[in-house]
Amino acid sequence: MMPPYYVAPEQLMQDKAEYAKKGIAKGRSIIAMEYVGGVLLIADNPAASLCKISEIYDRIAFCGAGKYSEFESLRKAGIRHADLKGYMYSREDVSGRSLARAYSETLGGIFSQEMKPLEVEILVVEVGTASKANEIYRITFDGGIIDERGVAAVGGPSDAILRFFSEREWAQDAPLDTAIALCCDAFTRANAQDVTVDALEIAVLERDQTGRSFRRITNAARNGMDK
Amino acid sequence: MRLDLHEYAGTSFSEYVRQCRPEVLPQFGASASFPESVRYLERAVPTGTTILALKYEGGVVMGGDRRATEGSQIASNRIEKVYAADAHSAIAIAGTAGPCIELAKLFRTELEHYEKLEGAELSYEGKANKLAQMVREQFPMVFQGLMVVPIFAGYDLRLGQGRICQYDITGGRYEEIDFCAVGSGGKDAQNTMKEHYRRSLAETEAINLVLSALFSAAEEDSGTGGPDPIRGIYPTMKLVREEGIVDIGEERLAAMCLELLEAKKRRHRAV
């Protein structure tokens, strides 16, 4: 009988990580950025109907970059988790932090136990209230969880986008149209080609809203904003 | 907690909970019932009655009184019977208070869950049929003396008009053209509306008519609570409109109630 091939665990993990990173880098990026009225979520996504940004709960949103089928099943599981928790306990007990931890455990478990890691990187964003700061969590393919401040980017050339933001002074309390224009510039630079506002998927979590604070900004509303 | 990515593939929250987390849902009607226990339950659990809905020019007004009874006792003076279900629909409930409130909460979660998963609101028809299914699932508990009879009102965005649906305990769904009332005081409320209703009422007229209907129900039926100016308890009401669900503020309703009472007093003296 042939003995099974021995592969060093370090090698195995490195191969999986490389595989996942390659998959994620192939796609396009998503930015979450704080602005004066809450958090702006903006994806370089010309497909109008296939969304990468989604509402999870009253003050929580989800952004997924990478393989569509994989972040879609993560998104749905997140909505089920949040709705069940809100139904069993109360709406105010559903928190972005607990959801981010659940995602981290899920992705981490799949990365270490299964043959194929998920080729996704996700953001869980919770908009704050008057007395509570916004929370932006970035969760990587291996279950790593990073608490971001101000701006976060996932998928595609996300490093180039973060470089764009670190190279300049920008205000975390900018008005919405300024924030959108800035993100548009960041996509243009990172992709090395013109990205227009029409080709972006845009949504916001609004701080002052009671109840469900997630709102999509449609193309029609954007045209009104330019004027 | 690790999420199970493939535990359920559908879009219905109630079905998901029933399949994967059945302990979370109430198990009414799961055990055998005896006549004496049914009689006992009827007297021992709060029951809410008299809800109504009426179309007006902007959509639908939906209202309910605030009383819940246990047999001949008053169980609560401040129960809420009208709930917003989503941005374009509301549900009012009559029957055994516990399961009724649970149904309203589950229905609201159901609509929101679908909307988030699919990225689009259900159509008016879709929502009304879903509610019929959920009422039908509660049917076994009727044999234990527990009833759930809702009214559903929504703004149909496709047709551009408000619509009303009434249900029976078996989940039968009946579309109403102008108005409807349900519960022990429903008949009296229905009669008042029949007397004074016309199409395209203005908002204030419609609210006034709903209030008078609830007044006459309270006068004839011990299960329906009238306005209580001493404690400041008045019926609750919601408007279902294209722009969304609007709660009619307590102050506005109180003022309109007092005005109606004054008018009644004047009429009574003149007789």
Image: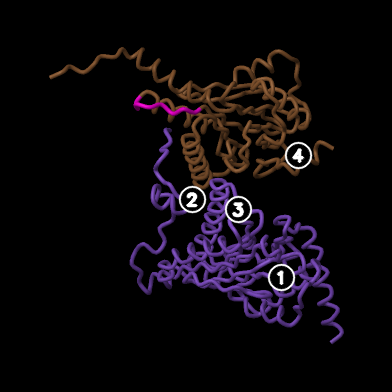
Q: Nearer the viewer, residue A140 or A129?
A: A140
Amino acid on which the number 3 mark rests in the picture: Glu
| Foreground disc of the pair 1, 3 | 3
Which residue is nearer to you in this view: A147 or B161? B161
Q: CA distance from mark 3 to mark 2?
A: 12 Å
Question: What residue lies at 77% left-to-right and 26% top-to-bottom?
Answer: A174
> Drawn colour of chain B?
purple
Q: Which residue is mark 4?
A: A222
Which of label 3 and label 4 is nearer to you?
Answer: 4
Q: Chain of mark 1?
A: B
Q: Residue A202, how many percent across, how many down?
A: 67, 36
Amino acid type for the residue under numbered disc 4: Arg
Mark closest to the chain's N terminus, 2 or 1: 2
Give the label on residue B232, or none.
none
User: Mark 2 highlights which residue?
Assistant: B11
- B48, above or below A187, in the image: below
Q: Is residue A43 magenta?
A: no
| Location of residue B163 by image quarter | bottom right
Alpha-carbon span between mark 2 and mark 1: 31 Å
Palette colour of chain A: brown
In the rendered image, residue B174, in percent from the top left (x then y), is placed at: 57, 74
Q: What residue sits right under mark 1 in the picture?
A: B55
